[in-house]
Image (cartoon, grey):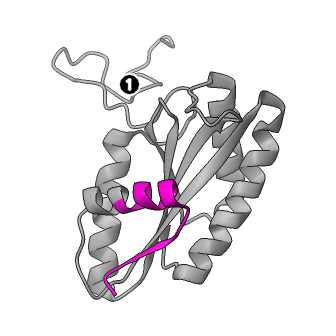
Amino acid sequence: MPAGATYCPSCGVRIDDPEALPLHVVDRQTRLFNERFIRPVLEDELARGHRYGRWLGILLVELRTQADHGSGNSDGLKAMAAALINSLRDVDTPGLLKRMPAEFLIILPEAELSGTAHAANRLIQAVNEAVKDQDLKAEVGLVCVNPAKRFRAGAVIEAAGRSLRTGRPEVMGR
């Protein structure tokens, strides 16, 4: 702790408040938002898209070994997170959904199916290039949410998981 600090530099909690709990919203290893933070952001974006009539793209990216097993390799997680951040737009929100197997959720506001597919291709290329030395690969599930109908975050993540398993994009709310 730095001398004379009032707030903890890693979690932002006031040091002299005994009842304060740290609000860790960033995964320490990947430096991306954690599940505790990314799910409410997804709920907010779904509501915003429905309210203003804008499409929302969701990508679920899973890190696997070449033998097709899930991976929680720490070096792979760090390399993948860096590649994710460098290949997304400023308005996109990436987050770590779970560690084993490593699953990342990326929220793409105002992205229709073609824009989401383009982002997925760009992202997969960047991530696979970043983790190829570690015998890892990334796979993606793609979901586009039509703003005409209201959906919850859990249903959207479940649809993205189906897309990841089948390899086919899903459009919710046709």
* Residue 107 picture location, percent across and down: 47, 62
Task: Say whether residue 49 is visible.
Answer: yes
Question: Residue at horizontal 64%, vertical 68%?
Answer: 119
Question: Residue at horizontal 68%, vertical 58%?
Answer: 123
Dividing the picture into quarters, in which one does residue 143 lie?
A: bottom left
User: Which of these two is toward me, 155 or 29?
Assistant: 155
The residue at which mark 1 appears reads as 7
68 versus 120 height, above or below: above
User: Which of these two is toward me, 108 or 128?
Assistant: 128
Say whether residue 115 is left or right of residue 95: right
Q: Is residue 167 magenta?
A: yes
* Residue 101 picture location, percent across and down: 50, 33
Task: Sort mark 1 into few (<14), some (14-19) or many (20+) by Cα contacts within 10 Å.
Answer: some
Q: Give the extent of the magenta segment.
A: 159-174
Question: Residue at horizontal 39%, vertical 37%?
Answer: 25
* Residue 79 picture location, percent across and down: 71, 36
Dividing the picture into quarters, in which one does residue 132 lie?
A: top right
Number of numbered labels in the structure image: 1
2 versus 38 height, above or below: above
Q: Quadrant of the C terminus?
A: bottom left
Question: Residue at horizontal 37%, vertical 22%?
Answer: 6
Q: Is residue 43 magenta?
A: no
User: Which of these two is toward me, 44 or 69?
Assistant: 69
What's the amino acid at mark 1? Tyr
Task: Say whether residue 106 is visible.
Answer: no
Say whether residue 77 is left or right of residue 66: left
Furthest residue toward left: 19
Say whether residue 155 is left or right of residue 132: left
